[in-house]
Image (cartoon, helix red, strand yellow):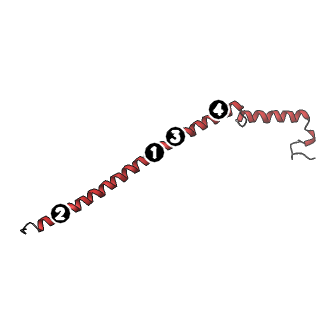
């Protein structure tokens, strides 16, 4: 084989010790870069992530409950305003009728 152009490196020149060195360097690079971590570290990271997701879910549930409470309050307020408007209309009709019949004798 020609090998890599201009480097003098040929595949048959790779010996067992060369493969072992390449494997050790690959593993060392993977560990240093964080691509490979101990199981204990991975479990700790996953449990921290799950705890954070739980906290976010709980907070979302709190916000949803607050939203539902606010919607219920707004619905009650709208119903009360509707009832007050109906009372105001009734009072207006009664006052108009009283004024119209004020001069009439029974």
Q: Earlier in the sequence, mark 3 or mark 4?
A: 4
Mark 4 or 1: in front is 1
Q: CA distance from mark 4 to mark 1?
A: 32 Å
Label 2: which secondary element: helix
Q: CA distance from mark 1 to mark 2?
A: 44 Å
Q: Position of residue 14 (x, y in %)?
A: 90, 38
Q: Position of residue 17 (x, y in %)?
A: 89, 32
Point 80% across, 34% down: residue = 25
Mark 3 is surrounded, within 10 Å at the Cα level, by few (under 14), some (14 to 19) or many (20 or more) other residues, namely few
Q: Earlier in the sequence, mark 1 or mark 3?
A: 3
Point 67% across, 33% down: residue = 43
Label 3: which secondary element: helix
Q: Are marks 2 and 3 in contact (CB under 8 Å)?
A: no
Mark 2 is surrounded, within 10 Å at the Cα level, by few (under 14), some (14 to 19) or many (20 or more) other residues, namely few
Q: CA distance from mark 2 to mark 3?
A: 54 Å
Q: Quadrant of the C terminus?
A: bottom left
Task: Please indicate whether residue 58 sits to the left or right of residue 84 in the image.
Answer: right
Q: Residue tagged by mark 3?
A: 58
Mark 2 or 3: in front is 2
Q: Residue tagged by mark 2?
A: 94
Q: Are marks 4 and 2 in contact (CB under 8 Å)?
A: no
Point 13% across, 64% down: residue = 98
Q: Residue tagged by mark 1?
A: 65
Q: How many marks?
A: 4
């Amino acid at each position: 084989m020609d090998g890599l152009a201009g480097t003098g490196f040929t595949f048959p020149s790779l010996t067992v010790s060369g493969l072992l060195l390449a494997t050790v360097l690959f593993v060392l690079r993977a560990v240093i870069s964080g691509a490979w971590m101990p199981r204990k570290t991975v479990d700790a990271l996953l449990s921290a992530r799950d705890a954070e997701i739980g906290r976010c879910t709980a907070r979302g549930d709190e916000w949803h409950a607050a939203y539902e409470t606010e919607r219920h309050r707004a619905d009650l307020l709208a119903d009360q305003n509707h009832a007050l408007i109906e009372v105001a209309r009734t009072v207006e009709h009664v006052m108009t009728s009283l004024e119209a019949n004020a001069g009439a004798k029974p």
